[in-house]
Structure formats: structure tokens, C-alpha cells
Image (cartoon, rainbow, N blue to C red):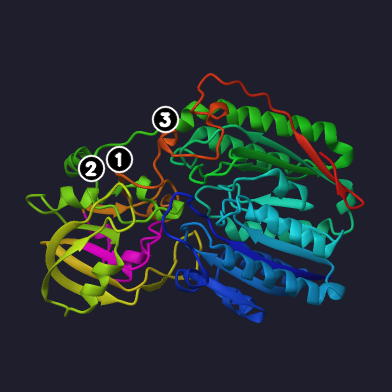
């Protein structure tokens, strides 16, 4: 058996003024082709690595074509999408006679300039190329799953975890299911329910939020049923402005078990819908109140978490609302926080370590933020390249661009980066000698993925209400393409009836 593999994994924020292009993949992620994909993933634990390793164990030959991943950012440029799409399709076409099946690793919440559903578009293009050959697709838990996405693949596998610490296992599962059902694809069907709701992500983490944990546990239980191939929950990230927006349930099942699968799918959707008010109830504090509570805490470190500026949701990472409060703090306490500002970094790199400098930082991209003036001693400079060492994206090399550390008060350090840093892993601090476990206050920007790494450090966490592009109050998201009158929480009184849509292979036609 020989399988074609490609990956295009980018979570985007429709409201970001920044754009993602080929250079962004190269600078803040990876853009690989051919055998470089396999060699890169030898010491990585993501879905591509899991797929490759499992195929090797099954004696399945993999033909890797293209693999692109980057830290979440603004919309992908149309020309970049076309180039990557062309590379994937051309590679599959060239090897078509020798390929038996195909695997796509995608995110599900990528937006392209002028194209609302690029993943659905890519799947359709791949299907036109490969015909009736088996296709399995893996998708992020926060994907916005559309009808077009469900129509084309034979098997869909979601992360079913948040934080996403099972990426590798998702790839393993994708490979195993593709191998197991390679000759039974025509006997499978896909059931899909779109829920008209977008909620914050803070209370979707499965470790300490019972409603989501129960949903994921139920999916795992259902997959023990011989008639169920995969059961998936998708809690959409709400910062994409597309017409078909909402959370989803996708169940892949044997056709002869259709009635039971429909019942399972319906119950999952009903339980997800019942959790909507719980998911919406996020407690945040003003920067001033958060700092006050943090200083009073006997626990250290205290994570001062700004989810609205979360780079992991495609925000710009340049809020200085928290910095404004900390800069006035007396007496100072051991503190680290980070801000993205390429202009400020450039000034730092034109200065000498040990020099006292004054500069403007932050507010370069965030429309609700303004720069602030700050001075301090330049303590270190870096190229900003580091490797994820926590449970999410383990082993992946990334970059925050050129970086600098400014000590703006005794033992209070500001990390300034040229590219938005993914603060889910403290390695972006540690690679510059800043140790979170030794601090009283640690600034991060993350709805929930931080728990995968930071939960290994005893800590207290406070959500800080600062301005940004990934605000937790979804009713404040400035949608222009979404029918908010028929979407929770804009319409608190709306009713929802779970009705699965069915897709199945019938020659070259999928039926709803």
C-alpha cells in the first residue's frame, strides 16, 4: 500500500491586519517538501509524525508531497494558498498511478483572502484528482467544519482534545483507520451536525471543565462500538468571519449501523448545545484588579493571562495594557511578560547589551491598543529560534523572530519579539534565560492551550481583560458575514434541533 501525504495547517484570525504568506511559514513554522518532511518529523510529535510512524509500522509506504504549518496568524494570502494548493495537487497527480490512498492534515479554521472555506476547496480539488481512492483527513478541535469539508473525505479524524496534546495520536489513528478500512470505504458514511453557536474557548479545556470532558469521553466510548469508525467534537474558534460558522459534530460509521450512528451523533450535539451557557461564562479581571489579586496570592508564579491578545488565536500579541500597570508597580516583584514589536526589537538589536535604552513598545497592529514609552537595561538579544518541549507541538522548531529582553524595573523583564510568540510553551521564555517557575508574575496570552505545559508548574492563573483580536465576549466580535440573529450567544432565546446530515460514497456522488 502506498499513501500520498500533504499538510496545510494554519489557524487564522479574520480580523487581523496582518497577512500570512510563504515567508511566514518559513519564519514562524515550517514549509517542507518531499523527503524533507519525513526527516524533519523524526523527533516531532504532531499528526504528520504520528501518521508517518504508524505507516512505517504497518509497512505502508508514504509519499510525502508538501507540509506547511505556522503559528496562528492573519488570513493567508490568495497567492500563497494557490501555490501550496498547486504543489499538493501536482505532487499527487504525478504519483497517482502508484498511490492507493491519501492523507491530508489540515486545521479547519483557515481563511484565505477572498475565500471563506479554503480547506473545503482543497479537499474538493484533491477529490477531483484522486477519484474514488480513499482519503482520510485530520482536523483541529477548533476547526470550523463545513459541509464541503465533510462531503469529500471518506474518514475524518479530529483531535478530540484541548489542549491539543494528542496530535501525534491523531496521526496514528488516521493511519490506522486508513489502513483498516482501505477496502471498505464504500461501506462507510459520515454524519454531520452544525451547531449554531460560537463560545469562548477558555472553558472548553477537557482537564477541568466537566461538560467538555464528558463529551470527549463519550466520543472515545462510541469508538469502541464496532459500527463507529470515528466520533468527533469540534468547538470552533470564533474569530473567523465566514457564513457557515459554528461548532460541529462529525461521526463516521458503517452504513449498516446508520440508525444507531444517527442517534449517537444527535445525542452528542444535544449535550454540546446544553453546555453553551457554561462555556460562555468566562470570568476576567481588569489589568489593575488582576495584578492586585496576583500580588495578594501566596502561590507563585501567578499567570496573568491575556486571552484577547492570544497569538494562538491569530491575535497580534502586542497589547501593553498589562505592561502599563506593571510599569508603575512599587515595590517591583520578579516578573516576565512578552510583547510583539518588530520596530522596538530592531532598536534593541542596534544597541548593546547592558545599555540603558528608551523606546516605544506595543500597539503596532492591535487596533484597540496604543504604544507606550518604556526604558530599561537591555539584558539579552536572540535570534528567537527555539523548539517546543511541552506536550503540544513537541519537537517542532519555531521562531519568534529576533528578540530582546529589557529589564524595566529591578527583576521585572519584558521580552520583545519581532514575530508573535506562541506562549503556550514557556520555552519561548526559557530560551532567553527567563524561568517562569522563579517568578512571582508571568504574562501569557492563551485561552487554554497553556495548560499542557504550565500545569507542570504549580501556579495560579487569572484571566486579564485587555484589548485584542480574540476577545472572549463573542458578542463583541465584529462579524460582517455571519447571520448573528441565528447564532448563540447573539440570540439567547433561539432553539436548536439536532438533525444529522448524511454523506456517503455512491460512485462519484455524495448524498446529503
Look at 67% across and 66% down and name the residue there.
Answer: 85
Q: Is residue 57 magenta?
A: no
Percent across and percent down for residue 169 are: 63, 58
Q: Which residue is mark 3?
A: 281
Q: Can see residue 328?
A: yes
Which of the marked residues, 1 or 3, is nearer the chain's N terminus? 3
- The residue lying furthest to the top in this view is 493
Of the 4 image quadrants, the one containing the N terminus is bottom right
Dot 1 lies on which element?
A: loop
Percent across and percent down for residue 14 are: 49, 50
Q: Against 87, is 483 above or below?
A: above
The reply to whether callout 2 and callout 1 are in contact (CB within 8 Å) is: yes
Which of the marked residues, 3 or 2, is nearer the chain's N terminus? 3
User: In the image, is 291 to the left or to the right of 62?
Assistant: left
Rounded to the nearest angstrom, the CA distance separating label 3 from label 2 is 19 Å
Q: Against 236, is 28 above or below?
A: below
Percent across and percent down for residue 277 are: 48, 26
Answer few, some or many: residues within 10 Å of disc 2's Cα (few below 14, many 20 plus, some between 14 and 19).
many
Dot 2 lies on which element?
A: helix
Of the 4 image quadrants, the one containing the C terminus is top right
Q: Against 423, is 418 above or below?
A: below
Which of the marked residues, 2 or 1, is nearer the chain's N terminus? 2
> Which mark is drawn over residue 287?
2
Rounded to the nearest angstrom, the CA distance separating label 1 from label 3 is 14 Å
Of 186 and 88, nearer the camera is 88
User: In the image, is 295 to the left or to the right of 128?
Assistant: left
Answer few, some or many: residues within 10 Å of disc 1's Cα (few below 14, many 20 plus, some between 14 and 19).
many
Dot 3 lies on which element?
A: loop
Please provide the residue range marked out in magenta. Answer: 414-439
Q: Which residue is mark 1?
A: 465
Count of picture labels: 3
Amino acid at each position: 500500500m502506498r499513501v500520498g501525504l500533504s499538510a496545510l495547517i494554519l489557524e487564522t484570525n479574520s480580523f487581523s491586519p496582518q497577512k500570512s504568506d510563504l515567508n511566514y511559514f518559513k519564519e514562524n513554522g515550517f514549509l517542507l517538501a518531499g523527503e524533507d518532511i519525513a526527516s524533519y518529523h523524526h523527533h516531532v510529535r504532531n499528526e504528520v509524525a504520528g501518521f508517518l510512524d504508524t505507516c512505517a509500522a504497518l509497512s505502508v509506504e508514504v509519499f510525502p508531497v508538501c507540509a506547511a504549518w505556522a503559528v496562528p496568524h492573519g488570513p493567508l494570502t490568495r497567492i500563497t494558498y494557490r501555490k501550496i494548493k498547486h504543489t499538493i495537487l501536482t505532487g499527487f497527480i504525478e504519483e497517482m498511478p502508484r498511490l492507493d490512498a491519501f492523507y491530508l492534515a489540515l486545521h479547519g479554521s483557515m481563511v484565505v483572502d477572498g475565500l471563506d472555506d479554503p480547506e473545503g476547496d482543497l479537499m474538493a480539488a484533491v477529490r477531483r484528482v484522486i477519484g474514488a481512492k480513499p482519503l482520510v483527513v485530520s482536523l483541529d478541535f477548533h476547526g470550523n467544519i463545513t459541509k464541503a469539508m465533510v462531503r469529500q473525505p471518506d474518514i475524518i479524524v479530529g483531535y478530540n482534545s484541548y489542549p491539543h496534546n494528542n496530535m501525534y495520536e491523531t496521526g496514528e489513528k488516521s493511519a490506522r483507520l486508513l489502513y483498516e478500512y482501505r477496502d471498505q470505504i464504500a461501506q462507510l458514511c459520515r454524519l454531520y451536525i452544525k451547531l449554531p453557536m460560537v463560545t469562548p474557548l477558555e472553558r472548553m479545556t477537557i482537564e477541568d471543565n466537566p461538560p467538555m470532558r464528558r463529551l470527549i469521553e463519550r466520543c472515545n466510548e462510541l469508538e469502541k462500538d464496532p459500527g463507529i469508525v470515528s466520533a468527533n467534537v469540534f468547538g470552533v474558534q470564533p474569530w473567523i468571519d465566514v457564513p457557515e460558522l459554528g461548532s460541529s459534530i462529525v461521526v463516521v460509521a458503517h452504513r449498516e449501523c446508520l440508525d444507531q450512528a444517527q442517534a449517537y451523533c444527535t445525542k452528542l450535539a444535544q449535550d454540546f448545545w446544553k453546555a453553551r451557557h457554561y462555556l460562555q461564562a468566562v470570568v476576567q479581571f481588569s489589568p489593575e484588579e488582576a495584578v492586585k489579586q496576583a500580588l495578594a496570592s501566596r502561590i507563585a508564579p501567578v499567570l496573568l493571562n491575556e486571552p484577547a491578545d492570544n497569538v494562538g488565536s491569530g491575535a497580534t500579541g502586542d497589547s501593553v495594557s498589562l505592561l502599563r500597570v506593571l510599569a508603575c508597580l512599587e515595590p517591583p516583584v520578579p516578573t516576565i511578560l512578552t510583547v510583539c514589536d518588530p520596530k522596538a526589537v530592531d532598536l534593541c538589536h542596534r544597541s548593546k547589551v547592558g545599555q540603558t535604552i528608551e523606546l516605544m513598545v506595543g500597539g503596532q497592529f492591535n487596533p484597540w491598543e496604543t504604544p507606550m514609552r518604556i526604558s530599561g537595561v537591555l539584558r539579552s538579544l536572540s535570534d528567537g529560534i527555539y523548539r517546543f518541549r511541552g506536550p503540544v507541538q513537541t519537537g517542532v522548531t519555531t521562531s519568534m523572530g529576533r528578540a530582546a529582553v529589557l529589564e524595566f524595573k529591578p527583576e521585572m523583564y519584558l521580552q520583545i519579539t519581532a514575530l508573535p510568540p506562541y506562549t503556550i510553551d514557556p520555552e519561548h521564555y526559557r530560551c532567553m534565560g527567563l524561568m517562569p517557575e522563579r517568578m512571582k508574575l508571568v504574562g501569557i496570552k492563551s485561552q487554554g492551550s497553556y495548560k499542557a505545559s504550565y500545569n507542570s508548574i504549580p501556579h495560579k492563573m487569572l484571566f486579564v481583560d485587555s484589548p485584542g483580536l480574540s476577545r472572549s465576549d463573542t458578542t463583541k466580535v465584529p462579524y460582517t458575514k455571519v447571520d448573528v440573529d441565528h447564532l448563540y450567544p447573539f440570540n439567547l432565546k433561539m432553539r436548536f434541533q439536532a438533525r444529522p446530515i448524511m454523506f456517503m460514497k455512491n460512485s462519484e456522488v455524495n448524498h446529503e
